[in-house]
Image (spheres, rainbow, N blue to C red):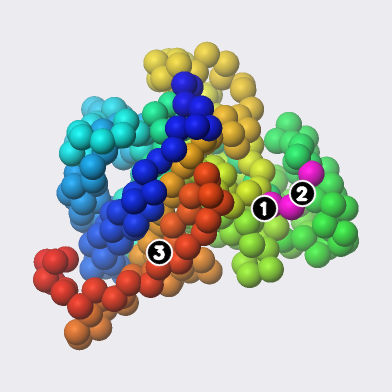
Amino acid sequence: MSATSLDRIDRGLTIEIARVTERAAVAAATLRGRGDEKAADQAAVDAMRSELNTLPIDGRIVIGEGERDEAPMLFIGEKVGTGHGAAVDIALDPLEGTTVCAKNLPNSLAVIAIAARGSLLNAPDVYMDKIAIGPGYPEGLIDLSRPAPDNLEALAKAKGVKVQEITACILDRPRHAQLIEDVRSTGAAIRLIGDGDVAGVIHTSDPDETGIDIYLGIGGAPEGVLAAAALLCVGGQMQGRLRLDTLDKRARAEEMGISDPHRIYSLQDMARGDVVFAATGVTDGNLLNGVRFYRDRIETHTVVMRSATKTYREIVARHYDRGKFGL
Ligand SMILES: O=P(O)(O)OC[C@H]1O[C@](O)(COP(=O)(O)O)[C@@H](O)[C@@H]1O
């Protein structure tokens, strides 16, 4: 990583970036609830890519739709933007939560993070073990190498509540059976989510609003970097460890410069410096409303965050020109 905290992102991008996720979210939302994950994802990819290519940046995708041979567009290493402007790295997921979008269930998002070159972890598309909490706690409170109950006890103590008053967010997957049992053994509550752990992690940043104190479990590594980018903007702590359990995965990671397969990454190892993050709701969620289609307009709900200024802005946009979305 070569970026320093002095590498500032052009503040104009904090509005430009919203257009990128708005465009992707509307495209995906037109196919919401149709049971066709691929079509919704493709629509979001096409829309995000065409909007991204209007931005005055020399952009390089470090977290994208996959590695070049498996993703024709927005692949890792793809150059995006007009090419005239700041050299930036980009993490994106045009449709985070493809299954929930196809089923019209909560919390699918169009997501992107833009950072100075070298400020985002280049991670392969493998699983990642994750733990995250929101702001206001002493640094080092959570530790991925410790058993979940220890982290829950530490969090409850620091929050000044009983562990029974803590709620953990966990993806509902068979691989989490033991984790779920361990968490329940402490008396803590669990919010099981079907998909969408970028939102799951972000929810820890405002427990009063979302009811979620801590995120635990294994999800995608790309989603881990995106979530870290968001948490960097609002404060909080997060750790991640890649699940490099096959020779092929280790080789892919090595190609990306990852030599220690067991390394635990801190939040700042995954995202640092000046990062601009945006997410637009595709379906309704705790964080954001989904896209609303009206006869005369389309409404989108977006959050834009920036780490250098620690700002969190919500933008409700009314698009009266439905034609610009091809509708
Ligand atoms: O579904 P899996 O294989 O358990 O993977 C978990 C990952 O899938 C998601 O739930 C949804 O990812 P997609 O948008 O690629 O469908 C992520 O939020 C999460 O990190």
Number of the label disc, if any, that sits on residue 137? 2
Q: Alpha-carbon distance for marks 1 and 2?
A: 8 Å
Q: Which residues are magenta?
A: 134-138
Residue 143: horizontal and vertical position, in percent?
A: 74, 36
The reply to whether discs 1 and 2 touch (Cβ–Cβ < 8 Å) is yes
Q: Secondary structure at mark 2?
A: loop
The reply to whether discs 3 and 2 touch (Cβ–Cβ < 8 Å) is no
- Residue, disc 1: 134
Instruction: Say whether disc 3 or disc 2 marks the residue closer to the N-terminus.
Output: 2
Residue 240 visible within the image? no
- Of all residues, the one furthest to the bottom in this rendering is 295
- Residue, disc 3: 302
Up-down: is 20 above or below 323?
Answer: above
Q: Is residue 135 magenta?
A: yes
Residue 167 visible within the image? yes
Name the residue: 73% across, 31% down. Answer: 145
Residue 285: horizontal and vertical position, in percent?
A: 48, 68
Q: Secondary structure at mark 1?
A: loop
Q: Alpha-carbon distance for marks 3 and 2?
A: 27 Å
Q: Answer left or right for 144 relative to 49.
A: right
Name the residue: 64% across, 37% down. Answer: 239
Q: Residues within 10 Å of mark 1 (few under 14, many from 20)?
A: many
Q: Is residue 261 magenta?
A: no
Residue 73: horizontal and vertical position, in percent?
A: 21, 39
